[in-house]
Amino acid sequence: MKHRKLKMGMVGGGNDAFIGAIHRGAAVMDNLIELTCGCFSVDPEISRSSGQSYFLPDDRIYDTYQQMFEHEMSLPEEERMDFVTIVTPNKWHFEPAMMALERGFHVVLDKPMTFSLDEAKLLKNKIEETGLILALTHVYSGYPAVKEAKARIAKGELGKLRRVYVEYTQGWLSDRIELQGGNNAGWRTDPKRTGKAGCIGDIGTHAWHLVEYITGLRVQQVCADLHTFVDGRPVDDDGAAFLRFENNMSGVLMATQIATGEANNIRIRVYGDKGGLEWRQMEPNRLILRWGNKPSEELYMGNNEYLHPLALWNTRTPSGHPEGFIEAFANIYRNFALTITAKRKGEIPDERMLDFPAVEDGVRGMQFIETMVKAGFDNDHKWHNWLD
Amino acid sequence: MKHRKLKMGMVGGGNDAFIGAIHRGAAVMDNLIELTCGCFSVDPEISRSSGQSYFLPDDRIYDTYQQMFEHEMSLPEEERMDFVTIVTPNKWHFEPAMMALERGFHVVLDKPMTFSLDEAKLLKNKIEETGLILALTHVYSGYPAVKEAKARIAKGELGKLRRVYVEYTQGWLSDRIELQGGNNAGWRTDPKRTGKAGCIGDIGTHAWHLVEYITGLRVQQVCADLHTFVDGRPVDDDGAAFLRFENNMSGVLMATQIATGEANNIRIRVYGDKGGLEWRQMEPNRLILRWGNKPSEELYMGNNEYLHPLALWNTRTPSGHPEGFIEAFANIYRNFALTITAKRKGEIPDERMLDFPAVEDGVRGMQFIETMVKAGFDNDHKWHNWLD
Amino acid sequence: MKHRKLKMGMVGGGNDAFIGAIHRGAAVMDNLIELTCGCFSVDPEISRSSGQSYFLPDDRIYDTYQQMFEHEMSLPEEERMDFVTIVTPNKWHFEPAMMALERGFHVVLDKPMTFSLDEAKLLKNKIEETGLILALTHVYSGYPAVKEAKARIAKGELGKLRRVYVEYTQGWLSDRIELQGGNNAGWRTDPKRTGKAGCIGDIGTHAWHLVEYITGLRVQQVCADLHTFVDGRPVDDDGAAFLRFENNMSGVLMATQIATGEANNIRIRVYGDKGGLEWRQMEPNRLILRWGNKPSEELYMGNNEYLHPLALWNTRTPSGHPEGFIEAFANIYRNFALTITAKRKGEIPDERMLDFPAVEDGVRGMQFIETMVKAGFDNDHKWHNWLD
Amino acid sequence: MKHRKLKMGMVGGGNDAFIGAIHRGAAVMDNLIELTCGCFSVDPEISRSSGQSYFLPDDRIYDTYQQMFEHEMSLPEEERMDFVTIVTPNKWHFEPAMMALERGFHVVLDKPMTFSLDEAKLLKNKIEETGLILALTHVYSGYPAVKEAKARIAKGELGKLRRVYVEYTQGWLSDRIELQGGNNAGWRTDPKRTGKAGCIGDIGTHAWHLVEYITGLRVQQVCADLHTFVDGRPVDDDGAAFLRFENNMSGVLMATQIATGEANNIRIRVYGDKGGLEWRQMEPNRLILRWGNKPSEELYMGNNEYLHPLALWNTRTPSGHPEGFIEAFANIYRNFALTITAKRKGEIPDERMLDFPAVEDGVRGMQFIETMVKAGFDNDHKWHNWLD
C-alpha cells in the first residue's frame, strides 16, 4: 500500500450522538487515520448533514451501511476505506461488522461487542478465518496508568494476587429519564436494542474487562445480585457480584447507574501479598501503589523515567500535562492502526501495538453479560460457573 | 451525688496495649471523667506497673477484676468508681461486664460486645433489669461527620435510600504476623479468644454498624463470601457480603485485613433517589454530599453554621482544626457520662447525649457475626436470614 | 471559500519536539483543520522526514519558512494554507509570524509571543492593519473549568475581588540538564534564544495570563524577587512577585522550575468578599467554589446543566470523562478556526468563539516579562510600574 | 517531688472561650497533668462558674491571677500548682507570665508570646535567670508529620534547601464580624489588645514558625506587603512576604484572614536540590515527599516503621487512625511535662522531650511581627533586615 493514512468509515456517530465526535477526534489525533466516509445515522437526512459537517464529499456519505460497503468496494484500493468504526446501539453491531469483515474491512466496535453471545462467537470465527483486525473500545484499558498497573502486576511487584475491588458508579439513570427522549438513555434501557442486560452490559462489562486486563486472571465463577431500582425500567440498573478468578484471586464487582450524583466513577483496587494498587478514572493520570512497610507511591503519568515502556508508549505529554478520555480512546485507535500497518508491510507488530481489546475480549464480555444476568436474578443458587 | 467527675475503673488497657491509652485519653479529654482504679492486665505485675504510671494510688490498682469489684463496692459511694471500661480480648468481655452490672456499675465495652451471641443477650437482659448504662465503642459512629450524615439522611435529604457501599480495608494481617508475638494480632486470630470470626468480627462489625447507624435501616438478609487468605490462619481474614435491608435498600459490605498497604480505611457511600453521600475515616472531618443536578458539596466539620446540631454537639474545634480518632472515642465517653449524670440528677438525658452505641447495638453486632459466619462459608445457599 | 477544512502550515514542531504533536493533535481533533504543509525544523532533513511521517506530499514539505510562504502564495486559494502555526524557540517567533501576516496568513503562536516587547508591538500593529487573526497558545485559558471560573467571576458570584494567589511549580530544571543536550531545556535557558527571562518567560507568563484571564483585572504594579538557583545558568529559574491590580485586587505570583519533584503544577485561587475559587491544572476537570456560610462546592466539568455556557461550549465529553491538556489546546484551535470561518462568511463570530488569547495578550505578556525582569533583580526599589 | 501528675493552673480559658477547653483536653490527654486551679476570666463570675464546671474546689478558683499566684504560693509544695497556662489576649500575656516566673512557676503561653518585643526579651532574661520552662503553643509544630518533615530535612534527604512556600489562609474575617461581638474577632482586631499586627501576628507567626521549625533555617531579610481589606479595621487582615533565609534559601509567606471560604488552611512546601515535601494541616496525618526521578511518596502517620523516631514519639495511634489538632497541642504539653519531670529528677531530658517551642521562639516571633509590620507598609524600601 502507498504511504498514506488509514481511511476510516463510520456506521453511526452522527451529530445527534456525542460518542461519534469522541471516536473521530480520537482516531485522527495521532495523524495516522483520516475520516473518509460514513453512514452516520439510520435517518438519511441526519447522515447527510452529519457527513457534510465533517467535510466529506457527497459521494462518500451514505444512506445505509449496505450501500456504503458496496460502493467502497467498488473504489480503487487507494481510495477505498480501510476499516469501519461502528458506534450504533448494540442491536446493530453484528450485522455491519460481519458485512465489513466479509468484504475485507477491519473493524472498530463499541462494547459490548454484540447483542448476543452467539453473534460474538460468529464474529470471532470470522476474524480467525479472515485474519482481519477487530478493536473493541474498552476505553479504560487505553489509559497509560492502567497499562502501568498491568505491567507492574505482570512483573510480580504485588506478589500473588488475592483480592480485587472494582466499581463503576454512575448516577444519570437515577430517574427514568429514558421516557424524556433526546438522550442516550433510551436504547440503553430497552432490551430490544441493548440486549439482556442494562447497567451490567453498559458499564459492568467495562469493570469486568478492567480487572481481567490489569490482573491477567480470568473469572471462573460468579455470585451476583442485580437490581432494577427505578420503577418500570425493563432492565437492571444496578448490580454487584462476587467473582472467583483463576489462581484463587477473589473479587467484588459493583456497577450502578442509580448512584445519584456520581458521574463516571470507574475505579479499581488490587491487592497481592506484597503490595496493592489503585486507579480511578476521574483522576486518570495517577496510579497509587501501596506497600506493607514503606510509604505508598503516587506515579504520575507523562514522560517519567520510572514508568514502564508500555505506559510510556501510550503517552503523549510530559508529566503534569494531563491526558484524558479521548487520549485513552486514541491509544486504542493508534495501536489498531499501527498493527494494521505493520501487517500490511509484512512486519510482526510490536507487542505494545497489539495491546488493545480485540475479538476475544468481545466474546468474553458477552459471556460475562450472560453469566451475570443468569446469576444475578437467581435467588436459589449462590455460585454460577462462567458461561462459555 | 456530689458535684464531681465520674470515676472510671479499667479492666485491661495496661502499658502493653495501645488501646488503653486511647480510652484513657478519650475519657478524660472533656473534663467529665477521671481514672480512679483498674486491673490493667492478667499479669499482676503489668497491672501494678501500669497503674503506677497512671499515678493511681496502690490500693486502687488490682490484680484481678473480681478483687477490684469487691474492693470498690466496699468504698463509700463518693470514692467508689462509677463505671468500668473493659478493653480485654473478646473472650473476657462478658464476665467482668456482667459482674460490674450485678454490682451496679455502668459499663463501657469494646466491640464486639461479647464472645457469643448468647452472652450478648444475657447482658441485654441485665441492662434492662438494672437500668444501668452500657456504651459500646463503635468509635466510627462518634465522628461528627458521621453524625451529620445520619442527620441529613434522617431529614430525608437523600430521598428514598437505594444503595449503600461500605468497606473497611486494612493490610496489617497480610502476613501471618500473629506468629511473631508482641502485637495485637495474636488474640484477634485465635478463635479461643476472639470468637467465631476474625476479620468480620474485628472490623466487619464496625462496617456493619456504620451502615445501620447512618441509614437507620436494618439488615434482614445476607449473602456472604468469607476468606482466609493467609495459610494456616484459623479464622477469616477477609470477607464481603450483599446485604438486604429494610425498605429495599441494598448493600455491599467489604472487610479485609489482607489488603497490603491499606491502613485503616473505613469508608461509606449511601445513595438515595435524591442524592448521595460519602465519608472516609482517614479524612474524617469531611463529608461529601452529591446531587444529580448541582455541584457536589464538601462539608467540613467544625463550628460551621451549616452543620446539623447533632454534629455540632460532637465537635470541639472551629472549622479547619481537625479532630480525629481519639475525639471520636471521646464523644462516646462524653455522651455516656452526660447520660449517667442526667439520670442521677433525675433528668431526662438530651437526645444528643443518648446518641452513643449501646447494648442493643452489641446484640445486633453479635447477630451480624453469627449470620456472616454461617452465610460466608456456605456455598450452597445464597441468601441467609438475619439470625436473631 | 469552498466548504472545506482550514489548512494549517507549521513552522517547527518536527519529530524532535513533543510540542509539535500536541499542536497537530489538538488542531485536527475537532475536524475543522487539517495539516497541509510545513517547515518542521531548521534542519531540512528533519523537516523532510517529519513531514513524510505526517503523510504530507513532498512538495508541501519545505526546507525554510521563507520558501514555504513563497510557494504557498503561488498556489490557488483553494489549495493554499490558511494559517500557520509557529512552534519554534522564542527567538524565531517574530520573523515567520510577520512574514505570514504580510502575506495574508492567519497565525497561531506559542507564548511568549516574541523575543522582545518591540517585536510584539509590531505584530500588534500588523494585526490591526490587516484584520488577520492571531491566536496565542496560553493553553491554560483553554480549559473548561477555567472558562467556568472566568464566567462565575464576571457574574459577580465572588463579589468584589480582593486577593489572588497563582503559582506554577515545576522541578525539571532542578539540575542543569541543559548541558546534557537532547531536551527542551537548552534554548529555554539560553538568553540568545529564549529572551531576557527564563522561568518567568516560560511559565511565569502562563501564571500571569491565567490571573488576568480569570479575573478580568490587569496588573498595574509589581514587586518581584527573581532567582537563579542553579549555578551557571544565565537566566532566572525561579521567581515570585506581589502584584497590584486594577480595583485594588492584590496578588502573589510564584513560578519556579527548581521545585524538585513537581511536574506541571499551575494553580490559582481567587478570593472576593462573597466567595473564593480554586483550580489546579493537574486535576483540571474540577473547579472548587468556597463560601463563607455554606459548604464548598466541587464543579466537575462535562455536560452538567449547572455549568456556564462558556464552559459547556468548550467541552466534548459527558461529566466524569476527563478532558486534558490536548483538549485545552484544541479549544484554542477550534475557537480560532470558527472565528476565521465566521469572518470569511461575513458573520460576526459568536462571543464564545472569540474567547481565545490573541495579540493583545501577547503584547501584555511581553510587558509582563520586561516588568518582571526589571523589578526582580532590583534590590533598591520595591514597586515597579507596569512597563507599557 | 512525690510521684504525681503535674498540677496546672490557668489564666483565661473560661467557658466563653473555645481555646480553653482545647488546652485542658490536650493537657490531660496523656495522663501527666491535671487541672488544679485557675482564674478563668477577668469577670470573676465567669471565672467562678467556669472553675466549678471543671469540678475545681471553690478555694482553687480565683478572681484575679495576682490572687491565684499569692494563694498557690502559700500552699504546701505537694498541693501547689506546678505551672500556669496563660490563654488571654496578647495584651495580658506578659504580666501573668512574669509574675509566675518570679514565683517559680513554669509557664505555658499562647502565641504570640507577648504584646511587644521588649516584653518578650524580658521574659527570655527571666527564663535564663531562673532556669524555669516556658512552652509556647505554636501548635502546628506539634503534629507528628511536621516532626517527620523536620527530621527528614535535618538528615539531608532533600539536599540543599532552595525554596519554601508557606501559607495560612482563613476566611472568617472576610466581613467585619468584630463589630457583632460575642466572638474571637474582637480583641484580635483591636491594636490595644492584640498589638501592632492583626493577621500577621495571629496566624502569620504560625506560618513563620513552621518554616523555621521544619527547615532549621532563620529568616534574615524581609520584603513584605500587608493589607487591610476590610474597611475600618485598624490592623492588617492579610499579608505576604518574600523571605531571605540563612544559607540562601528563599521563601514566600502568605497569610490572610479574608480568603472567603477557607477554614484554617496552613500548608508548607519545601524544595531542596534532591527532593521536596508538602504538608497541609487540614489533612494533617499525611506528609508528601517528592523526588526528581521516582514517584512521590505519601507517608501516613501512625506506628509505621518507616517513620522517624521523632514522629513516632509524638504519635498515639496505629496508622490510619487520624490524630488532629488537640493531639498536636497535647504533644507540646506532654513534652513540656516530661521535660519538667526529668529536670526535677535531676535527669537530662531526652532530645525528643525538648522538642517544643520555647522562649527563644517567642522572642523571634515578636521580632517577626515587628519586622513584618515595618516592612509591610513601607512602599519605599524593598528589603528590611530582621529586627533583633
Image: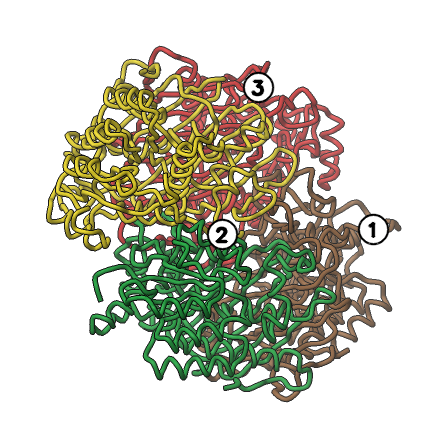
Chain colours: A yellow, B red, C green, D brown
Amino acid, disc 1: Pro
Q: Residue at label 3?
A: B230
Give neighbour class at mark 2: few <14, some 14-19, many 20+ (Cα, 10 Å).
Answer: some
Marks 2 and 3 share the same chain = no
Q: Residue at label 2?
A: C49
Q: Residue at label 1?
A: D349
Element type at mark 1: loop
**Chain holding disc 3:** B
Looking at the rendered image, the disc whose residue lies closer to the viewer, 2 or 1, is: 2
Element type at mark 3: loop
Location of residue C122 by image quarter: bottom left
Marks 2 and 1 share the same chain = no
Q: Which mark is residue A336?
A: none
Element type at mark 2: helix
Q: Residue furthest top?
A: B380
CA–CA distance in space, label 2 to label 1 = 72 Å
Residue C295 visible in rendering: no
**Closest to the observer, B222 or A191:** A191
Amino acid, disc 3: Val
